[in-house]
Image (tube, rainbow, N blue to C red):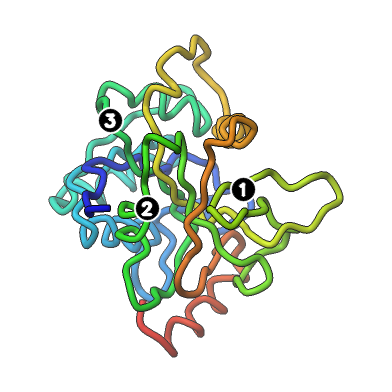
Amino acid sequence: MSFTAPSKAMVFAAGLGTRMRPLTATVPKPMIKVAGKPMIDHMLDRFARAGTRTAIVNVHHLADQIEAHLSTRTDPEVIISDERDELLDQGGGIAKALPLLGSEPFFLANTDALWLEGPRQNLRRMAEAWDPVRMDILLLVAATTASVGVDWPGDFLMAADGRLTRRAEFQVAPFVYAGVGIVKPELFAAQARRVFPLAPFFFEAAQKGRLYGQRLDGLWLHVGVPEMIAEAEWIISRSVL
């Protein structure tokens, strides 16, 4: 399949960052530096390298800091989706931003997920694997036991063809969601709610057999708590991000 990266990405930067307290009392989580660079810049730099031209970034907690930091960024171009008045959760954030995201499939990304690349760019590999005929959602997934900072029993099982199924209660799953995906905007177009989560859309797609995974090539670093920053920086210092 030919490579065409989604031209737009939805980057989630509106969360309260409660697990990163006390750091997030004064600095929004996406602005916390890892290896000398804010986490949001690690993600936006990856999108720039993949050829994604526009990133819609939602903001709420300490929004002014994020907006000021991104105001001069041109690659990718950043458009702010303002949630200062009401935090909409990830699903609601996508629904609010749909007029900006357009009608084509787009990337979505958390800002607390970093990784060391393997031989090929993972975003490029995702774009090459994307098949809208079979898929409604494609997620980047990483091996649960081989990732750094994973403190839960995994998220998904993956079939030989890449199809994902949800981990059952009390089950340990071999793969975790690595914080990046490609989704179809029409999944959110009919939503009447303002505030709603994203994860149920993953699970519904899985039930329909239309949720697929692209296994991460490299090492996933989940920087979700303050203690993980030093560990991630130690690993990064011995490799190339």
Q: Nearer the viewer, residue 78 or 117?
A: 117
The tag earlier along the polypeptide, 2 or 1, is 1
What's the residue type where badge 3 is placed? Answer: Leu
Which residue is found at the position 45% from the left and 65% from the top? Answer: 114
Picture coordinates of residue 156, whole percent (x, y): 66, 51
Q: Nearer the viewer, residue 87 or 170?
A: 170
165 on left or right of 163? right
44 on left or right of 137? left
The tag earlier along the polypeptide, 3 or 1, is 1
* Dot 2: element: helix
Which residue is found at the position 33% from the left and 47% from the top? Answer: 66
* Dot 3: element: helix
Q: CA distance from mark 3 to mark 1?
A: 28 Å
Q: Nearer the viewer, residue 77 or 211?
A: 211
Residue 21 visible in the displayed image: no
Dot 1, crowdedness within 10 Å: few (<14), some or many (≥20)?
few
Placement of 197 over or under 191, stated as above or below: below
Which residue is found at the position 57% from the left and 53% from the top? Answer: 177
What's the residue type where badge 2 is placed? Answer: Ala
The tag earlier along the polypeptide, 2 or 3, is 3
Q: CA distance from mark 2 to mark 1?
A: 34 Å
Q: CA distance from mark 2 to mark 3?
A: 21 Å
Residue highlighted by disc 2: 129
Placement of 81 over or under 212, stated as above or below: above
Picture coordinates of residue 77, whole percent (x, y): 17, 45
Residue 224 visible in the displayed image: yes
Residue highlighted by disc 1: 18
* Dot 1: element: helix
